[in-house]
Amino acid sequence: MQYRRQKSLAVRQAAAELAAARVHPAHYSNGDESRFRFENISGDNDPRANNAPTYVGNFTKCLPHDNDGFLINPSDYDDWVRATDSGEQSEIAGLRIGPGPFQPNGDFEYANPANPNSPPLLNWSHIYTDPPAPGLRAWESQGAGLTFDLEGPDAQSVTMPPCPSLDSQELIAEMAEVYWMAICRDIPFRNWATNATPESARNSLKRFWWFRADRTEDLNSVTDRLPGSLARRRIFSENGATPVPLEKLFRGVTPGEQLGPYISQFLLIGNTGIDNAQSITDGQIAYGAIRADQRVRIACEEVDYMQNWNEWLDVQNGADVRGRESYETGYRFIARPRDLATYVHHDALYEAYLNACLILLGLKAPFDRGLPFQLADYKDKQQGFAQFGGPHILTLVTEVATRALKAVRYQKFNIHRRLRPEAVGGWLYQRRHGNGTVRDRLAALTNMEAAFSGSSQLANVIEDRNGAKDNWLLPMAFPEGSPTHPSYGAGHATVAGACVTILKAWFDHGWELKSGGSRFAYEANADGTSLFDVSTIYPDTLTVEGELNKLAGNISIGRDWAGVHYYTDYIESLRLGEQIALGILEEQKLTYGENFSLTVPLFDGTSVRI
């Protein structure tokens, strides 16, 4: 027993030393926090005097804003950053939040000050009747990046390159993409090739400089020329003449994402269950003797949110209007982008990847060739179960999720603090409606405004969607808009990157998806009532790696479909999650006596062997 105790200690120490040997990188932001300033406001008592920062390029949701959408007091943002960096609950609890009114000490004014349980008074801009006026939302887990873990890379030992600056050509292109996604939100995936709106999107997006090879020399913002920015740049057109290829429209870029149907098979099919009780096209996933349905609730079509200024302003001031979206009766397969947005609005953290694991086990997908216990029982004399079997991978795929969340929370709250797309939409609204002072404060968006008004024709489409000239607010799929944490990186995408990396490591990633020995490719029909075989339409080989990468992309870009994230949030966060998963695999390998290996395909197309 003494030997076992010492051996156990040695293994834990080896894992700790492996983790400690990882270099903690420097973290760099895009510099927007100090770049944009208020004009020369006179008066010693004005908190925005002395050219204080406006923070218009950063996340300010839940802090108090004035009627034009700017921070009432930039010091509120400074206090928020300091409290977040400290992680002290008392400091966070002392922050100003919401629209006010506030007492001189910064606390709320209350309906009944004598009652300690009295709710605060809240000066909302929108008039609420049914449902009634909302309460406040708090920020979400801003201290998570300060926590420690007992396995895997430390939350602060991985990093992301700077996100696009507010005045960058990259952001102009990303926002154009997000606007077009909002416009195309209700068009069935099956109809994209024949519908005029995706065709208009393809012809509009081809004009943006970031997507054009011939405009490389014109990329001159602070971040456009950074190596990290250029490495993730997508070229859709050589000179702005040819439309964006349909197979690249609103898709991810990792291996397999642009092959086959838009939606991953792992979000559509089920498994056959006990005694082959069902077909995979039933969309039922057996969880032991029970089952879960792949169909989603049907959010009402053509119903968007935050399309008037007062609603937008209240949401930026922290109005808690969650749960006020509208649904039709019933459920359907993911047939339209809004269905995907609904999925990622309500999904449990690792839901999609646990489902994918169960589907792969049901398909009898082979494990990685480097794993043990894959010979016939009469040869191996043991089966994988607690180690190297179904329960092992089912546990492991979920184990990485919260580690990924902690790492991305550090990037969100402590490094980048990037504003959400909805906030950019608000600033564009003010570029069209604000007075001269307001417009000058938002001069960084001059090129974006010109690009949308020009040959891209995007301005006309936005105004038509919102029903008013010069209303450039971003139509949102959720009443509450984004979550109450910054945009970059993305929690969904980081978790996707981590969980999918685990699955690609465990299963034979080059195996072609088959059921009963036959290859398949399914897509939902236009109304989502059933799945139909499109393997003759898409002759591409759908592999474990490709469809898992597509799953990660669907979940991540599903948030873009809702209007709450950008493309860069997706791609850089996948890579962040990948780093977390690889670190956990490296450390866990030390705990097993068997001689085994895992070959892991990476999102950049290379692979690593553990």
Image (cartoon, rainbow, N blue to C red):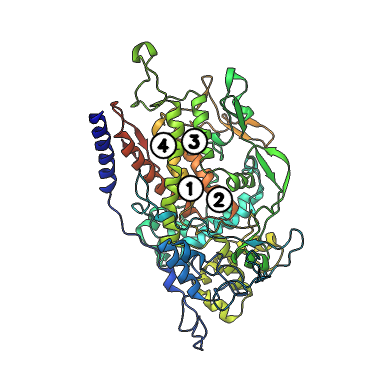
| Viewer-proximal residue among 559 and 486 | 486
Quadrant for residue 462, please give it: bottom right
Q: Mark yes or no: residue 258 visible.
A: no
Earlier-in-chain disc, 4 versus 2: 4
Earlier-in-chain disc, 2 versus 3: 3
Q: Is there CB contact under 8 Å for labels 3 and 1?
A: no
Name the image quarter holding the N terminus: top left
The dot on residue 547 is: 3
The span from disc 4 to disc 2 (Cα, nearest Å) is 22 Å
| Viewer-proximal residue among 239 and 430 | 430
> Which residue bears the numbered disc 4?
502
- Amino acid, disc 3: Glu
Q: Residues within 10 Å of mark 1 (few under 14, many from 20)?
A: many
Name the image quarter holding the C terminus: top left
Q: Residue at x 67, y 42 (%)?
A: 297
Q: Residue at x 44, y 57 (%)?
A: 143
Quadrant for residue 269, please give it: top right
The span from disc 2 to disc 3 (Cα, nearest Å) is 18 Å
Residue 240 rendering spot, x and y as whole percentages: 51, 57
> Which residue bears the numbered disc 2?
559
**Which callout, 2 or 3, points to the residue nearer the camera?**
2
Q: Secondary structure at mark 4?
A: helix
The dot on residue 493 is: 1
Q: Eyeballing the image, is 602 above or below 465?
A: above
Earlier-in-chain disc, 4 versus 1: 1
- Amino acid, disc 1: Ala
In this image, 104 relative to 578: left or right?
right
